[in-house]
């Protein structure tokens, strides 16, 4: 059973930084994509950033230049470095793992990020 555990959320002032981490356990076969999504109250869960097994990444437009996703395959961990945070970045951030070949989809429990103005 694959499990994802996130950490690193919290309260920060606008302009500040946070680093989220997500570590997965369990057996995964083949290449997989890891990503971060966020969900603000009353909104749907939206993609923030994704990174594939080869390190190629993609970002939602509003976070380009401010957020950076990375992964350490040896540690089964994906990171999201968030800089120049804005109040509109406030949301619950969820880690996601998706296996390319089998299409299996896994979610973490979510971690709250709150940016005060």
Image (cartoon, rainbow, N blue to C red):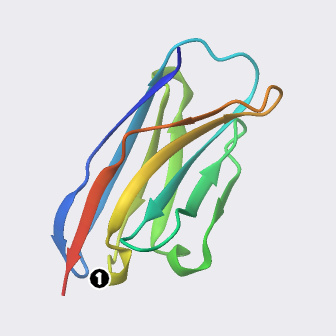
Q: Which residue is at 27% across, 66% downward?
A: 17
Left/right placement of residue 114 relative to residue 32 reads left
Left/right placement of residue 26 relative to residue 9 reads right
Quarter-of-image position of residue 13: bottom left
Relative to 115, is 93 above or below?
above
Relative to 27, is 55 above or below?
below
Q: In which quarter of the image is the C terminus?
A: bottom left
**Residue at the disc numbered 1:** 87
Q: Residue furthest front?
A: 42
Q: Which residue is at 37% across, 75% downward?
A: 89
Q: Which residue lies furthest to the bottom in this view?
A: 117
Relative to 13, is 35 above or below?
above
User: Disc count in the image?
Assistant: 1
Q: Which residue is at 61% across, 71% downward?
A: 60
Left/right placement of residue 81 relative to residue 70 reads left
Left/right placement of residue 92 relative to residue 106 reads left
Q: Which residue is at 23% across, 69% downward?
A: 114
The image shows residue 85 at horizontal and vertical percentages of 32, 76
The image shows residue 110 at horizontal and vertical percentages of 36, 47
The image shows residue 82 at horizontal and vertical percentages of 37, 64
Q: What element carries label 1?
A: helix
Neighbourhood count class around disc 1 (C-alpha, 10 Å): few under 14, some 14–19, many 20 upward: some
The image shows residue 45 at horizontal and vertical percentages of 52, 62
Give 51 or 102, whichever is nearer the viewer: 102
């Amino acid at each position: 059973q694959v499990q994802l555990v996130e950490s690193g959320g919290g309260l920060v002032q606008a302009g500040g930084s946070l680093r989220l981490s997500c570590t997965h356990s369990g057996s995964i076969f083949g290449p997989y994509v890891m990503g971060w999504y966020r969900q603000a109250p009353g909104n749907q869960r939206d993609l923030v950033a994704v990174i594939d097994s080869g390190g190629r990444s993609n970002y939602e437009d509003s976070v380009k230049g401010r957020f950076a996703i990375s992964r350490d395959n040896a540690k089964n961990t994906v990171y999201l470095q968030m800089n120049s945070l804005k109040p509109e970045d406030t949301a619950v951030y969820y880690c996601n793992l998706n296996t390319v070949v089998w299409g299996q989809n896994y979610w973490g429990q979510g971690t709250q990020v709150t940016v005060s103005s």
